[in-house]
Amino acid sequence: MSEQAHFVDESLLNKVPRWRNYLAAKLGFRNHWYPVKLSSDVLEGKVSQATVCGEEILLKRVDGEVKAIRDRCLHRGVKFSEKVECYTPDTITCWYHGFTYKWNDGKLCDILASPDSKAIGRRSVKSYPVQEAKGLIFVFVGDEGFEAPPLAEDVPPTFLDDDLELHCAIYEVESNWRVGCENGFDGLHVYIHRASELVPDTQRSLPIGHLAKSGDVLVHEEAGAPKGVYDAFANHTSIWEGKVDGQVVVTGTKRVSEKPTRTTAASLWMPCGLRVDDFPDQDITQFEFYVPVTESKHLYVMLVGKRVSTEEESAHFNHEFWNRWKPIGFENFNAQDIQARLALQTFYKRDTAWLDEMLIEGDSPLIKWRELCHRHARGIQKPEHM
C-alpha cells in the first residue's frame, strides 16, 4: 500500500462513546459485503485486481463464477499480481517459487520448485465469498469462521428488486469513505448544487437549504434487515433565499410544477450505501456506495435505477442513462460532490478533526448515522488485517 494505516488514539475514541466504532473505522467495517467491480470488468479467465478495506485482492472468473483470493503468497509475501501465472483455469502460481493455490478456496495444492514439501495441502491463502448482483461484484471482507449474512442485509432496501434495472459507473475519489457517506447524506449540502445543469434539465425546483427537524429522522435497525437512517425531505421546510445582513445574495430555483420541490428522501445504509428516492428525476432511484480502499481513498459506485416491465422500456432507460443521467448526473451534479469530498479530506484526514468540527441542528442525521454504525458494526477493519 502507498500509505501506512494506523490506529486512532484511544483517548480520542473515549471522547465520542456513542460513535467511537465509527471514528475507529478508518478502513471500514469487517464482516460486511462491499461492491468492488463491475461484473463486465471481470472476464472469463482474466485476473483482475481490487483493494477493499485496505486488503489487496485478486478476482478471476472461472467457469462463469467469480472467485477472489488475497494478493499475497504465503511463502515470502510477494504479490501474485507482480507477474500473474495461471497454468490451469482453477489455480494461480506464485512467480517467485511456484507456490500454487486453488482459486476456489485458496488451498495450497502444489509447489513447483519443491513438489514433495509437507506444506502442500496444509495451508491456504485467504479467499473471499463473492456474489454478483445488479451488474456488480460484491466481496465479503470478514473474519475466519464468520458466516456471511445475506447480501440483502448490506445494501439499501429495493436495490435487489427484480424489476429494478440499474446502470452503473465507478470512480476513485481521494478521500476517506466516511467523508463520502456523510457528503452524500448531508441534507444541507444541496447548497453546492444550485448551479448544476441537472436543475434546468429536469425542470424541478431546488432550494439552497432547509430548516432541520432532527426528530423526523427514522432509524432502521431491525434484526436480519438492512440498518440505516432515513431522512424524509418532505418533512423539512425549504430555504429559497440566502441573506447576508438582511440582503438576498443567493437564491434557489423555485418552479411552479407538478414535480416535487425536493427529492422524496435520502437514506444511508450500512456498511456504506446511499439511496435517494425520485432522483435524478421522478420514478428514478439513485444508489451510491462509498467503498473503503485505503484511509484516504474510496470507490464511488453510482447507480441509477428504474422499474421496467418491457424490453422497450429497458432500451429507453439504457439510452437515457448514457445520454442524460451519466453526463448531467454523474459527471456534472455528482462531480460537485467529489470536489466537496476532496476539500473535506484535507480537514478530516486528521483524527482530531472529527472532534474539532462544529455541527449544527441540520447535521443531526449525520450523528444518527454515526451512532447507528457504532451499534451495528460487525467488526472494525484494522491495520493488522491488511
Image (tube, helix red, strand yellow):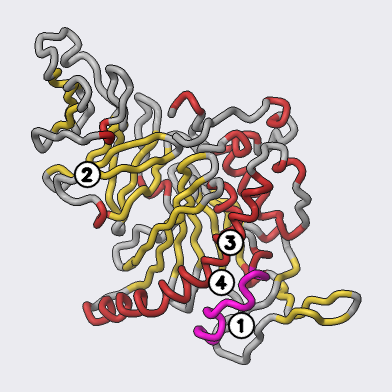
Helix, strand, or loop for circle 2?
strand
The C terminus - image quarter: top left
Secondary structure mostly taken by the magenta-highlighted segment of the chain: helix
Asked if the residue under mark 3 is in contact with the one under mark 1, i.e. CB atoms within 8 Å, the reply is: no
**Badge 1 or badge 4: first in the primary sequence:** 1
Type of the residue with mark 3: Gln
Q: Nearer the viewer, mark 2 or mark 1?
A: 2
Q: CA distance from mark 4 to mark 2?
A: 36 Å
The residue that disc 3 covers is 339
Query: As displayed, is residue 153 above or below residue 200?
Result: above
**Badge 1 or badge 3: first in the primary sequence:** 1
- Give yes or no for residue 196 being in the magenta stretch: yes
Type of the residue with mark 1: Ser
Give the image quarter of residue 146: top left
Q: Is residue 29 left or right of residue 323?
A: right
Q: CA distance from mark 3 to mark 4?
A: 25 Å
Query: As displayed, is residue 156 above or below residue 378?
Result: below
Residue closest to the far bottom:
256
Q: Nearer the viewer, mark 3 or mark 4?
A: 3
**Badge 2 or badge 3: first in the primary sequence:** 2
The residue that disc 1 covers is 205
**Badge 3 or badge 4: first in the primary sequence:** 4
Q: Give the magenta range.
A: 190-203
**Residue 66 marker:** 2
Helix, strand, or loop for circle 3?
helix
The N terminus - image quarter: top left
Q: CA distance from mark 1 to mark 4?
A: 13 Å
Q: CA distance from mark 1 to mark 3?
A: 23 Å
Q: Nearer the viewer, mark 1 or mark 4?
A: 1
